[in-house]
Structure formats: structure tokens, C-alpha cells
Amino acid sequence: MIRHENVFRHASRPGILTLFVILLAFFPGVAPALEAPEENPPVYEREGSSRVFDIPPGRKPAPVEWTFHKTADNQHPNGVEQQQMWLMNNARANPPQEGYFLATLDDGDVLNAISAFNVDLDMMQDEFDSYPAQPPGAFDVRLYNAAYEHSLYLISIDGQNHVGQFDRIDAAGFMWNRAGGSVYSYAKSGIYCHAGFNIDWGYGTGGMQDPRGHRMNTMSLKAVVGGGFTAGDFYNVGVAVVPENNPSTNVGPLVVTENFARAITTYPDHYNRFIVGTIWEDLNCNGYYDSGEGEGSVTVTPVGGAFYAVTPPSGGFAMPITSAGLYDVTFTGGGLAFPITRTVHVGALSVLVDMPVSEDSDDDLLLDSYEMEYFKALGVTDGTGDQDQDGLTDAYEFRYLTDPTQKDTEGDRMEDGWEVTYGLNPLEDDSQDNPDGDNFTNLEEFLSGTDPRVYTAPWPGDTNQNGRLEFEDALFCLQIQAGLRGAGLYPIYDMDGDGKTGVEESILILKALSDLP
């Protein structure tokens, strides 16, 4: 095993801790300081390929169930563990929103910790505003098993540390070339644990730990240190939340271990690209997933993919994607009001498909929660309308995860309906891409009304591709006719629809230059 420097290993702060002990001795009526997550969460790297392989469609076998996203007894991730996954992945998807969420979180225990550590919330939000979005992490049962064993170890020592954390990952059979670990033996609740890790409260700058190691793990942020070693790229995650209410121990009430890893993909059942999500209903209307809100027994199938998944009671799912492409992801069974299809683009990285669900009280094949989120009322549409007039019906806006009130969901100046029609991604700014290899970007194709999948000459007859017809173009066409330009027919310069370029194009060009009909 080749292990390198721990990215987050910094000097401990014994002076601060000693000061608290002295203060408590002189002021016994003062409540003890809150415990922060264990400082300096480790990240290690070693050899092994993490390449994402694309399997040709013709070589794919029939899809099989991916079972590594949950335990065999269907009990884990449990509700609190899935909450950690949901909060983590939504934070990765939108870091600025996560900063605002943490700064405005209305939870008494979290507010007490923010006050006790004197967290500078403005500094924290500025930091989150600077982070790029990252792909989601997929729950892996092997990483969970290792995390569970580590949490039991923390209870046995009545404390928190990282001793043996990565050895337990090895023992669980997960092959990795980069791994990180976070532990919190004093978490008061699921939301408190997430806030403790991602605010990263502690005794450093702004009331947060230096560096923000737990946050880097949670957010899968890239941190470069000497020698070119890089943290981040954590596509696989295992979270174990173990209750501990024994009055004789100091740890608890929740002892949490989180393992993060990048897989060595040359081993069987090891992947780094997934479709990931949670099927859940916001029963208490607080805007985020809570334990007890998951939807179990739902079968999630990317049509044409190699794997499908069935959700445990907590509602989480993940399945590897072995080829990049456009996938219709179907959701069937469980307590769903009706079968649902979402269409997603998968490139080189994992994709998050969060699935808040509800009943469909008006039977329009649109979930009530979706209608209330975007239209603020039921019955505004029956799914066949097009509220934003972008060429995509409201039902298809739901399917493609686009905003039915905005013509251009991601703001790349191309309407959602046009992008869907031509196989582009309405959730990604692909305006400057040029998939057909002509001289036009997708945005230019949209503005000119041409097909971005088909090579388009700037102008029929424009042989030098300068955007205007000239005498030189007419001469070029005559040279093609005379065989002086090779044997090609040059159909891209065809002006009369016969599939070839020649004397007819020369005549048409000369007429155009002379303003003749």
C-alpha cells in the first residue's frame, strides 16, 4: 500500500483546549465547550487507475440489479444516513445555496454551536460562493460497513480519532486510490452532524477549522498540496450513524463516521460514474430531507443502462453508468402515484436526480409538489400546455427537469425545447459546443435555425467559407465541374438540391452577384 501525506494534517491546538480546562476549573457553573468534529480529517492517495470506461452499447448484457447502494437487509442507509447523503449531494450541486442554507438554518442545537464557536457566517458564505459545483457521491455498502465498524470503535474508546479508518475500508473490500475520512462522535442530530461537518466549526479562523477538511470531504473539493497530491473526486461514500445513549459514555447521542473514496475501476464492481438520487416526500414542508420521508421499493431503471436499483425504505438509489449518453430513467412501484420518467444527460461524471414526490390529486400526471413549486397552484396546467412557450410541454419540462416557467432554464440563450429536440442538454451551458464540426456553435445554429447535428456550410455556394458569395466561389464551382478540384461532389455547396456542386451553382452565384432573378 502506498500512502502519501495527509492533506489536512496541521498542528493541534492544545493551548486552546488547556485554556478551556482551566476556565472550567475556576468557573464550574459554566457549561462545557461543545465538541467539534475531530480535527485534521485524513485524505490519502495511492496507485491504481480510476478511469471511467465506456462500454460499447452492443456489448452490454441485460441490466442487473445494483445492490451495493444499500445493505442486504435493506436497513441502511437508514433515514438519518440518507439525510446525510441528501444534504451532501445537494450541497455539492449548489455550493452558494448551501452556504445560505447553513447560515439561515433554524435549528436550536446548530444555532448554539454557531454561537459557541463564534462562527463568522459572512466569511463562511463567501467561501461557499467561491466553490464550483461537484458531482454527487454514491452510497456504497462496503464503505458503509467500514464506517460502521469505525463508529463502534469510537464508542469503545469513548472518543474520536481516525486510527485504523482506512484499514477498515481495505478490510471491507473496497479498492481505492484516493480516500478521505470524517468522524463526529458528539453529533446531536442528523442536521447537526451535517452542519458540523460543512460549516466545519472549530477553533480556527472565523470559528471554523483550519483547513476546512471536513467541508472539503463533504463537498468533494479539490485541494492541491506539495508534490501534486490532490484531494477531492470522491464519487463513492459510506455513512454510518450509530446511536449511543449509554449514560456512562461521553460520546453520542450519534456517533458518525463518513468514508469518501475514488474507486480503482479495474476491479469488478468498482465504478466512479453513477446516477444518484433520493425519492422522498417533504412531509414537514421544511425544504430538505428528514428521516422518515423516503420512498422505498421503487425500481429505478436507466433505459439502456447496465444496472437498475431498488430503493430501501430511506429512498436512496445509485447505479453505475457504463456509457455516456442520454438516458430515460424510469421510476416504478413503491408508493408512487404513477410511473415517472426523467431524462438526463450523463457525461464523464455522476449525475444527481433528486426526486421529491407527492400525490397527484388532480390526475394530470404532474405531481402536486411540482405544480405548487413552479405554478403556485394546482390546475394551472394539465401537462399538455407550454406555459413558458419554449416548445416543451409542461409534462416534458417535468421529465427533463427543466423550469416550466423559463424558456431557457440554464441561461445559455438557447430555448429548452430546441435543445431537447436536437439532443442537447437543457441543464448545461453547451452554447459554445460544436458537435457537427462546422463553423457554427450551437448558439449560432439556434439563432440561424439550422440543425446542430448536421454540418452546415455558412452559405450554400460559399466555397471559401467566409459568409458571402463572391466571383471566386463561382470559379471554384466551375473547377469542381471540370474535375480540377478532385473527384468529390462537394454536396455542402449544393444550391439547387441535386446533391452536387457544379456549373449550376456558378450560374446561381453569378445571378446573385448581378441581382438577377
Image (cartoon, rainbow, N blue to C red):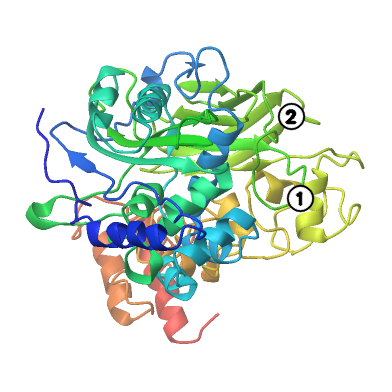
Q: Which residue is mark 2?
A: 339
The percent position of residue 436, horizontal first and vertical second, equals 38, 54
The percent position of residue 14, horizontal first and vertical second, equals 23, 56
Q: Residue at x 44, y 20 (%)?
A: 68
Residue 410 visible, this angle: yes
Image quarter (top left, top right, bottom left or bottom right) of the N terminus: top left
Image height of 318 relative to 516, above or below:
above
What's under tag 1, amino acid-wise?
Cys
Residue 13 visible, this angle: no
Res. 285 mark: 1
Total marks drawn? 2
- Circle 2 packing at 10 Å, graded few (<14), some (14-19), many (20+), is few
The percent position of residue 433, horizontal first and vertical second, equals 39, 60
The percent position of residue 464, horizontal first and vertical second, equals 28, 72
Q: Is residue 496 left or right of residue 161?
A: right
Measure the alpha-carbon separation of dots 1 and 2: 23 Å
Q: Residue at x 45, y 44 (%)?
A: 136
Instruction: Give the mark nearer the N terminus: 1 vs 2.
Output: 1
Dot 2: element? loop
| Residue 21: quadrant of the picture | bottom left
Q: Residue at x 54, y 49 (%)?
A: 192
Tell me the mark number nearer the camera, choosing from 1 and 2: 1
Q: Residue at x 26, y 27 (%)?
A: 265
Q: Is residue 40 left or right of residue 319?
A: left
What's under tag 2, amino acid-wise?
Pro
Image height of 396 relative to 22, above or below:
above
Of the pair 470 and 275, the residue shown nearer to us: 275
Image height of 122 relative to 503, above or below:
below
Q: Is residue 299 left or right of residue 437?
A: right
Dot 1: element? loop
Image height of 215 relative to 146, above or below:
below
